[in-house]
Image: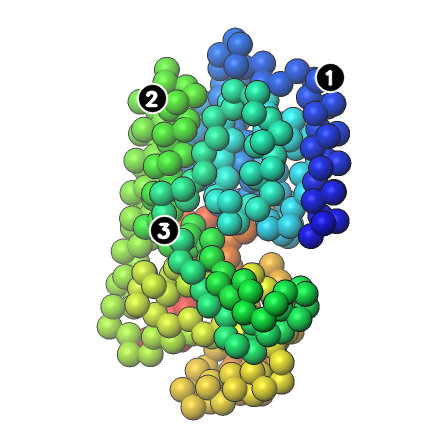
Amino acid sequence: MMLNRLKMTGILSAAAFFLVGCGANESSETGISEDGIKVVTTFYPMYDFAKNVVGDNGEVSVLLDAGQESHGYEPTPQDIAAIAEADVFIYNSDEMETWVPSVLESIESSDVIVVEAAENIALFEMVEDAAAEEEHDEEEGHEAGEDAHNVDPHVWLDPVYAQEEVDAILSGVLEADEANKESYEANAAVFNEKLAKLDASYQTAFETAENRTFVVQHAAFGYIARRYELTEVAVSDVSSDAEPNPAKLAELQRFMIDNQITSVYYSDSASSKTAQTLAEATGAALEVLSPLEGITDEDQEAGKDYLSVMEENLEALKKVIQ
């Protein structure tokens, strides 16, 4: 952790010199530029939500590419300068993008409007099982029982909470650009209606299901489980993709066989090794559930977005939840 703090200190110091050379947030003096509002987001869901709100009124950019890990991301001086020079900066939460608070402290003089999209959403805490907790403590050098609670930041996967995040983004955009209020509000209303229909699709698909349990490699889908009264059984906890010890793997195999679980899910952004092992041991099918932390440029050009991937997740879950 000390090494990471030193790295961040060095990055922020470099960014300070970079900002002096570039000049921070010229729009704070001149208002919204002729090219429209400039919005910087952290990772894909925030980008997609903001893009739907902003529409044709400006430019929305994203810092993290598909495949980059949001928690341990180290922003470059150019990234920090882009945040400082933006009209609006949008991120999910301090629990997801843990590097953001340090960056914001370094640009306190900037007039950028900061939106923590999940700020008003109560994040759920998850408790590691004893074996996982002990293994985590040993790896990280913690005392036994320390950090037993992990906050789950994956709120954007719940279509209802996604609407709340869109509303938070709308508020920040309106604060920056009141002149285009009607356009932003109309855009947000259209997108929130699509999110409401997505929620209705999930509700309808699962309301009469008898089997309501699904097995995933990574515990990223707790908000979907809670929203639709499902049970998520995860191989690894919300903050780790570590492989389980043999005892836990055997326990999961017995659970899947005893409960006739016919599919095991893995993330499209992580290794499928453990899920593959479970599938082979139990005869289950291997399926993808996307946590939507990133979509490649190629997939976006092919028409994939938050809504379409969430529909794909629904179809995948329907193979088990029925």
Where in the figure is residue 49, as x and y percent of width and height?
44, 40
Any mark on residue 122, and which? 3
Dot 3 or dot 2: first in sequence order is: 3
Query: In the picture, which quadrant includes the C terminus?
Result: bottom left
Dot 3 or dot 1: first in sequence order is: 1
Q: Is mark 1 on a helix, strand or loop?
A: helix
Residue underneath mark 1: 21
Q: In the current view of this chain or complex, which residue is farthest to the left? A: 208
Where in the figure is residue 54, as x and y percent of width and height?
43, 29
Badge 1, how many Cα within 10 Å: few under 14, some, many 20+?
A: few
Q: What element carries label 2?
A: helix
Badge 3, how many Cα within 10 Å: few under 14, some, many 20+?
A: few
Dot 2 or dot 1: first in sequence order is: 1
Which quarter of the figure has residue 164?
top left
Residue type of the residue flagged with mark 2: Lys
Where in the figure is residue 304, as x and y percent of width and height?
51, 49
Is residue 272 something one can see in this rendering? Answer: no
Q: Nearer the viewer, mark 3 or mark 2?
A: 3
Q: How far apart are marks 3 and 1 (CA)?
A: 40 Å
- Above or below, comparing residue 66 to residue 206 in the picture: above
Q: What element carries label 3?
A: loop
30 sits left or right of 81 in the view: left
Q: In the current view of this chain or complex, which residue is farthest to the top? A: 30
Q: Distance between the residues labelled 3 and 2?
A: 28 Å
Q: How far apart are marks 2 and 1 (CA)?
A: 34 Å
Residue underneath mark 2: 181
188 sits left or right of 236 in the view: left
- Above or below, comparing residue 44 to residue 316 in the picture: above
Which quarter of the figure has residue 133?
bottom right
Is residue 158 something one can see in this rendering? Answer: yes
The residue positioned 58% from the left and 14% from the top of the image is: 26
